[in-house]
Image (spheres, grey):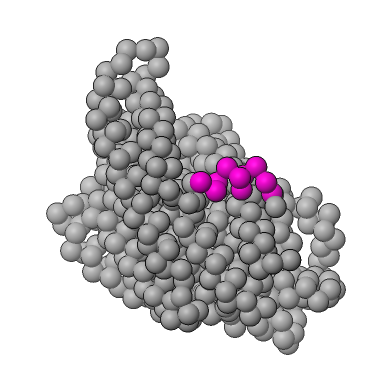
């Protein structure tokens, strides 16, 4: 079989499975929107909801440090090697040891975080909150910490299934998580307030874990009561994991810093940033995270076999597809973001002022959408090469830039300045990582990617002009649907048509190949 045929099959495999994962993530996003609609109607933007979202920041940081993406990127290459040499017993022993270590460490750190919660909230997380709001944040954080254990075990489950190139059930786990919070919002929040949402989050984390068990049973997973710290494979996972823990820890620490700074701004700023971020995360998760998750096992396999040409080609092709999809999404979110927020959230306690606050955060976060989505792939190229140190060092530099920019911008731009600082820093981080990869791999198909990016930018600009010109008319159309819905549907259809026509006219190769890849699994 020719090298070209192998590469084509890899591209089709990645794209087909990415489509499956993206559809699952899309369903997850829809469930998340339903959850947020219910929360918005009941709470609006304000101090109570600020406390709820602030309470998640340190548990999220704890999960990331112990069992988040850091563990996945270290565990998958080592676990895959055991599977490749047909050592299933060794693979299950490794998985069991890592699972048991995660349980022990998470329990210990969660207990410490719960004990020191008052100090952490007062000094680190939300110094701008008043005493009552800080006390409520402490209670909520202690509840949310219970979900961290479920997420820790669930993360290992996902890594095992990804190693076997099973992506569906891990992708469905985020779909069932919001169900728990919806239950909390509908049946517990009327009596318990935001504490009902926190209890719902615990239920959702349990569902997140349980949904993957059927496939684990099917592939023959066996749990063993071992820790195996002297096992070389366990040691390799821990060594590889160390720098990546710090890398992701830096990212989540920046979310804590953002919350700290936002707590000093107007009430509702923390919630506005949270919901603006979640809207930006819709296309990033569906496109960037999906491509990153599906491409990573292939990149790791190519790196393990020393196939640098295949690694360059696979990374370049996936990166060009990500750019092709996220650039128009960026323009679309900026133009249609306000009516989208109005349609989804503006009811009950969520008023037009809240819509505007979330839209400001959305616009400035969306400027970094291409960067955030590309980082999902570019960072995993380093992890496939079993280099977790370089992304860490670059992430630390980007974090310093973000803090300096945030301090400079928040005075004049409020919470919008915090979002813009994030977008600038992430985009710079991706460019620097690509430059390093180019030197290390002897190229990253940069000129080919740059040419395509220029064509995509032009097609996106034409799309944006068309939507911008027609949007005022769409908002005035009198139909049974709300004007915001008319604008969103009409603007999306018009934008998609203009982008596709422009893309084909400009010979954007990723668009031309997309139908064939979707129709054929390869």
* Residue drawn 41% across the image and 68% down it: 446
Direction from residue 294 to residue 440 in the image, left or right: left
List x then y, in percent, for residue 271. 35, 46
- Is residue 250 something that shows in the picture? no
Using the image as rendered, state which of residue 517 and residue 109 is in the foreground: 517
* Residue drawn 29% across the image and 44% down it: 461
Direction from residue 458 to residue 196 in the image, left or right: right
Write down the region rendered in magenta: 512-521
Q: Residue furthest left?
A: 412
List x then y, in percent, for residue 217. 83, 55
- Is residue 359 something that shows in the picture? yes
Q: Quadrant of residue 264?
A: bottom left
Residue 514: say if magenta: yes
List x then y, in percent, for residue 131. 31, 54
Direction from residue 39 to residue 398 in the image, left or right: left
* Residue drawn 43% across the image and 54% down it: 323
Q: Is residue 149 above or below residue 283?
A: below
* Residue drawn 70% across the image and 52% down it: 522
List x then y, in percent, for residue 253. 40, 67
Image quadrant containing the N terminus: bottom right
Using the image as rendered, state which of residue 101 and residue 82 is in the foreground: 82
Count of numbered circles on the image: 0
Direction from residue 282 to residue 240 in the image, left or right: right
Q: Is residue 125 above or below residue 92?
A: above
Helix, strand or loop: magenta stretch = helix
């Amino acid at each position: 079989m020719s090298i070209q045929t192998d590469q084509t099959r890899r591209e089709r495999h990645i794209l087909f499975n990415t489509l499956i994962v993206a559809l699952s993530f899309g369903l997850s996003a829809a469930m998340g929107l339903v959850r947020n609609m219910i929360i918005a109607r009941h709470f609006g933007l304000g101090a109570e909801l600020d406390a709820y979202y602030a309470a998640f920041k340190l548990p999220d940081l704890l999960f990331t440090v112990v069992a988040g993406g850091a563990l996945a990127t270290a565990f998958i290459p080592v676990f895959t090697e055991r599977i490749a040499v047909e050592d299933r017993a060794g693979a299950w022993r490794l998985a069991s040891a890592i699972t048991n270590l995660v349980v022990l460490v998470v329990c210990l750190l969660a207990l410490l975080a719960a004990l020191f919660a008052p100090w952490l909230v007062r000094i680190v997380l939300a110094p701008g909150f008043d005493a009552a709001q800080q006390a409520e944040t402490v209670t909520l954080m202690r509840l949310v910490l219970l979900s961290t254990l479920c997420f820790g075990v669930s993360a290992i489950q996902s890594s095992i299934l990804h190693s076997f190139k099973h992506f569906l059930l891990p992708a469905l786990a985020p779909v069932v998580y919001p169900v728990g919070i919806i239950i909390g919002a509908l049946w517990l929040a009327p009596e318990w307030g935001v504490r009902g949402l926190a209890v719902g989050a615990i239920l959702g984390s349990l569902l997140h874990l349980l949904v993957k068990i059927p496939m684990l049973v099917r592939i023959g997973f066996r749990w063993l009561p071992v820790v195996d710290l002297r096992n070389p494979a366990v040691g390799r996972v821990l060594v590889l994991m160390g720098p990546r823990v710090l890398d992701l820890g830096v990212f989540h620490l920046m979310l804590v810093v953002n919350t700290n700074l936002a707590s000093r701004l107007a009430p509702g700023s923390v919630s506005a940033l949270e919901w603006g971020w979640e809207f930006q995360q819709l296309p990033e998760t569906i496109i960037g995270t999906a491509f990153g998750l599906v491409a990573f096992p292939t990149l790791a396999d190519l790196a393990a076999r020393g196939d640098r040409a295949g690694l360059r080609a696979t990374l370049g092709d996936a990166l060009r597809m990500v750019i092709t999809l996220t650039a128009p999404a960026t323009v679309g979110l900026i133009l249609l973001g306000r009516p989208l927020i109005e349609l989804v959230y503006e009811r009950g306690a969520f008023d037009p002022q809240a819509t505007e606050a979330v839209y400001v955060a959305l616009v400035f976060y969306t400027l970094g959408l291409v960067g955030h989505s590309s980082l999902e792939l570019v960072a995993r190229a380093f992890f496939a090469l079993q280099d977790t140190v370089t992304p860490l060092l670059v992430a630390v530099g980007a974090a310093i830039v973000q803090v300096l920019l945030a301090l400079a911008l928040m005075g004049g731009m409020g919470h919008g300045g915090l979002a813009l600082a994030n977008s600038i820093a992430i985009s710079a981080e991706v460019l620097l990582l690509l430059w390093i990869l180019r030197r290390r791999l002897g190229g990253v198909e940069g000129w080919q990617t740059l040419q395509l990016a220029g064509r995509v930018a032009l097609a996106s600009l034409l799309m944006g002009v068309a939507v911008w010109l027609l949007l005022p008319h769409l908002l005035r159309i009198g139909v049974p649907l709300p004007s915001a819905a008319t604008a969103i549907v009409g603007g999306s259809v018009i934008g998609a048509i203009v982008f596709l026509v422009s893309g084909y006219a400009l010979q954007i190769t990723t668009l031309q190949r997309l139908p064939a890849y979707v129709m054929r699994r390869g």
